[in-house]
């Protein structure tokens, strides 16, 4: 976001994640990860935010490495910052 002049530092961007672990052949395996992102941003930037959100995961080396083995769900909520 910052590369597109949308502030995301400080307390503007918050992420939480949870996952599901299952046993396979007696070994614990991470099967699913759900990531919820909240961004405080001016609604006027929604088109840019949606565009960045649509491509950011595929530019992440960790995501690209784990994606074949783990089902990821990533959601973004945009909140209007307090005046």
Image (tube, helix red, strand yellow):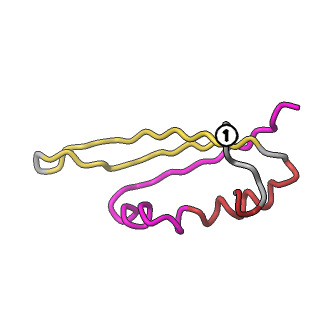
Name the side, left or right, on which 39 lies relative to 33: right
- Farthest-out residue, left: 26
Where residue 44 appears, as percent x and y from the top left, is 88, 52
Q: Is residue 51 above or below residue 76?
A: below
As drawn, 9 above or below 11: below
**Is residue 20 left or right of 61 when viewed as pictured?**
left
Horizontal arrangement in the rendering, residue 40 relative to residue 23 (left or right): right
- The residue under the point 47% across, 45% down is 34
On the image, numbered disc 1 is attached to which residue? 10
Residue 14, placed above or below residue 2: above
Asked where in the image residue 45 lies, by quadrant, the reply is: bottom right
Q: Residue at x 11, y 45 (%)?
A: 26
Q: Is residue 63 magenta?
A: yes
Residue 47 at x, y = what percent?
80, 60
Helix, strand or loop at label 1? It is: loop
- Quarter holding the C terminus? top right
Label 1: how many Cα within 10 Å (few below 14, some 14–19, many 20+) = few
Residue at figure coordinates x 43%, y 39% from the top left: 18
Q: How many marks?
A: 1
Numbered range of the magenta stretch: 57-83
Instruction: Using the rendered view, name the quadrant where residue 56 is placed.
Output: bottom right
Q: Residue furthest front?
A: 10
- Please tell me whether residue 43 belongs to the stretch shown in magenta: no
The N terminus, quarter of image = bottom right
Near-viewer residue (46 or 11): 11
x%, y% of residue 28? 20, 45
Residue 68 appears left or right of 50: left
């Amino acid at each position: 976001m910052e590369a597109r002049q949308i502030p995301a530092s400080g307390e503007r961007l918050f992420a939480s994640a949870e996952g599901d672990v299952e046993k396979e052949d007696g070994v614990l395996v991470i099967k699913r990860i759900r990531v919820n992102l909240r961004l405080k941003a001016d609604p006027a930037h929604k088109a840019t935010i949606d565009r960045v959100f649509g491509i950011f995961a595929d530019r992440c080396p960790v995501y690209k490495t784990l994606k074949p083995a783990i089902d990821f769900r990533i959601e973004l909520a945009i909140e209007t910052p307090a005046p």
